[in-house]
Image (spheres, helix red, strand yellow):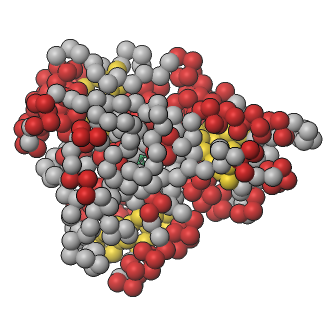
Amino acid sequence: MTSVQVKIQSFDPARPAPGSATSPVAASCTPELAVSPWNFDAGAPAYGPGSSMEDVAPAETPRQGVIPEEYRLADDAELHERICHAKERLGNDLVVLGHFYQRDEVIEHADFVGDSFQLANAALTRQDAKYIVFCGVHFMAETADILSRDDQAVVLPNLAAGCSMADMADSSSVEECWEQLMELYADEVDDGRAAVVPVTYMNSSAALKSFVGRNGGIVCTSSNAATVLEWAFERGRRVLFFPDQHLGRNTAKAMGVPLEAMPMWNPRLPLGGNDEQALHAAQVILWHGFCSVHKRFTVEQIDDARARYPEANVIVHPESPMEVVDAADSSGSTDFIRKAVAAATEPSVFAIGTEINMVNRLADEYPQHTIFCLDPVICPCSTMYRIHPGYLAWVLEELVAGRIVNRITVDAATTEHAKTALQRMLDAKP
Ligand code: SF4
């Protein structure tokens, strides 16, 4: 697990990706990136500025509400001071977790930096902490609550920091899909295996992790998706994979599953928009979900990077579309990308397809390399972007005052089955 080195740097939406030759000043995906996130917390549920801004937030998306004016008016330096002071007051009672995709001025306060599962596990190493402040998105805080003790409180600084991909698979749609599939497969010859094994990506609600736990399924991350699919194929004739179609497709394709055996399930259509024959022949049924950050990467961007830097090592996240993964030199989780850069002993060029905050941080950490984001239009994850230092200062000062705000709790029954699904994943490790 990486310890954070303190470095004060404000997010600058106009900052060009290092090595970008397309424009001296890269454009941002929306001018609203310059606007503070609380301007979006008073209105209807929405993901706010950034790359998932155009996705529709479900009506039940948690609302944050506007935080006190003193936090909204404070400048970066004051917020930095207040966060440091509150952390000092809370001492070992507090652990702050920061996802790779968070902005730098939040990451500098994190005790641990990593991907969602690394962070949930990092929290387990801090059994003395009464408060786990998760600077990430909602499903991550839920996972931390599932894995932590009952007397540890998990806090999400901005309740509206959800994940548009996770929201694309809601429990009622998945339950409905499951019922249709069970009915369809009821007549199949029993060969001792389940007709279908549900697999959910870590980027899903606790309710869905619980659903797969109850139905003989398992959770996966972008690091272990192939291992998890192997586990599922040993136990079932086919897999229902949600919410990210791209991770499912890229992983199954690399394992030799033909594309025609991977129908897509559109929850708005009967049988997901498929005919019965296609579903009987299916090996992996892909849910119609995607990450709005990673779907922005294109083969043209890779061609452009290679034209500018023929020696470039192109690495993309497997949430990217299949054509992009196929055109890249390699694909892997955020941890895979970090390790690939760290392992380069000679000055190298890396063209990376993942979230901009992480790419910029790698570029700063490894100045001997030329590291840039494939997408020349700077566009951070909207939902991660909602964790502004103002919210972090607010939740920490409330904790100092003895009040827990924005606590994320998962009920006991959901926790029990979600833990089963997570444990199966841990046990499936090669
Ligand atoms: S980067 Fe994509 S998957 Fe990750 S939190 Fe943002 S929208 Fe969700």
Q: Can residue 234 be seen at all in this image of the molecule?
A: no
Q: Can residue 163 be seen at all in this image of the molecule?
A: yes
Q: Residue at x 29, y 40 (%)?
A: 40
- Note whether 348 is above or below 163 in the view shown: below
Image location (x, y in percent) of residue 406: 32, 24
- Can you tell which quarter of the image residue 213 is in? top right
Image quadrant holding the N terminus, namely top left
- Can you tell which quarter of the image residue 345 is in? bottom left
Q: Residue at x 21, y 63 (%)?
A: 14
Image location (x, y in percent) of residue 222: 51, 51
Q: Is residue 381 left or right of residue 254?
A: left
Image location (x, y in percent) of residue 87: 16, 29
- Give the residue at the far front of this rendering: 43
Image location (x, y in percent) of residue 134: 33, 34
Q: Residue at x 28, y 74 (%)?
A: 20
- Note whether 22 is above or below 363 in the view shown: below
- Say which of 114 and 265 sits in front: 265
Q: Is residue 201 left or right of residue 124?
A: right
Q: How many marks?
A: 0
- Say which of 118 and 27 sits in front: 27
- Can you tell which quarter of the image residue 46 is in? top left
Q: Residue at x 32, y 61 (%)?
A: 29
